[in-house]
Amino acid sequence: MRTTQELFSLQGKTALVTGGSRGLGLQMAEALGEQGARVVISARKQEELDEAVAHLTARGIEASAIAADLQSEANVQPFVEEALRRLGQIDILVNNAGASWGAPAEEHPLEAWDKVMNLNVRSIFLVSQAVGKLSMIPRRYGKIINISSIAGLAGNAPGTMSTIAYNTSKGALVNFTRTLAGEWGRHGITVNSIAPGFFPSKMTKGVLASIGVDRLAQGAPLGRLGDDEDLKGAVVLFASDASKHITGQILAIDGGVSAV
């Protein structure tokens, strides 16, 4: 029987984190690396990836980066193959890359709807499918962690945000998580989702400015927004053997917002 420390260890494991160059993705890549995993991160901008790899390397983490635009189907297979070339196998997949768009539903541009859906849902299906077929299913082992949002658990309060495409995409990702867990459990693959609340990031900068940090914090039972440590424990749990009997679950990390 393993100790608790051994169950949470990621020594000898490999991880692929999309959208890993900054914000929540970088925080999770850092957590996985700190537990011993070798990490590959991806994003669209090479300069941001270079900075992120330098940050991770300075913390003693073995990390590299692949620049890729996952909105394009043609980029997915080469991206996963390159990640496998570097890592040898992919034990952990964190599907974090995502986009948002703010506009009233009656005026929401179709082009923006498609952009959000393609990155937040379609690309996650394609990346998961490729990683599953090329690495996880043949080895009968894998940990897939989808980053959804509490925006996928409910609508928006009046007078706050107009993000119908984003909310819809994250709601789809919640049930994608459950459905894939049901299908791939027989292959020894767990599929879970983290649903963050508000964290300061480039994506949320505009919302935080328009609604106000204090107002958003007051709506949380813990009275604050997420910080640069708050996803670390959850991603390590879902990535490690500590969660070997947990699959198809959605864990909100939101200071209690979704509970009340």
Image (cartoon, rainbow, N blue to C red):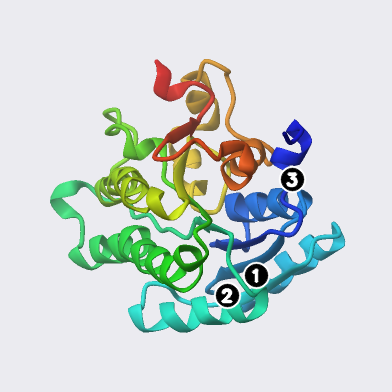
What residue would you read off at disc 1?
Answer: 48
Q: Which mark is residue 106?
A: none
**Rendering coords of residue 167 (x, y %):** 30, 44
3D distance between C-alphas at marks 3 and 1:
28 Å
Disc 3 residue crowd, few under 14, some 14–19, many 20+, Cα 10 Å? many
Disc 1 residue crowd, few under 14, some 14–19, many 20+, Cα 10 Å? some
Give the residue type that dot 3 points to.
Answer: Ser
Q: Are marks 2 and 1 in contact (CB under 8 Å)?
A: yes
Label 3 secondary element: loop
Q: Which mark is residue 9?
A: 3
The label nearer to you, 3 versus 1, is 3
Q: Which mark is residue 45?
A: 2
Q: Are marks 3 and 1 in contact (CB under 8 Å)?
A: no
Give the residue type that dot 1 points to.
Answer: Glu
Q: Earlier in the sequence, mark 3 or mark 2?
A: 3
Q: Quadrant of residue 76?
A: bottom left
**37 left or right of 216?**
right
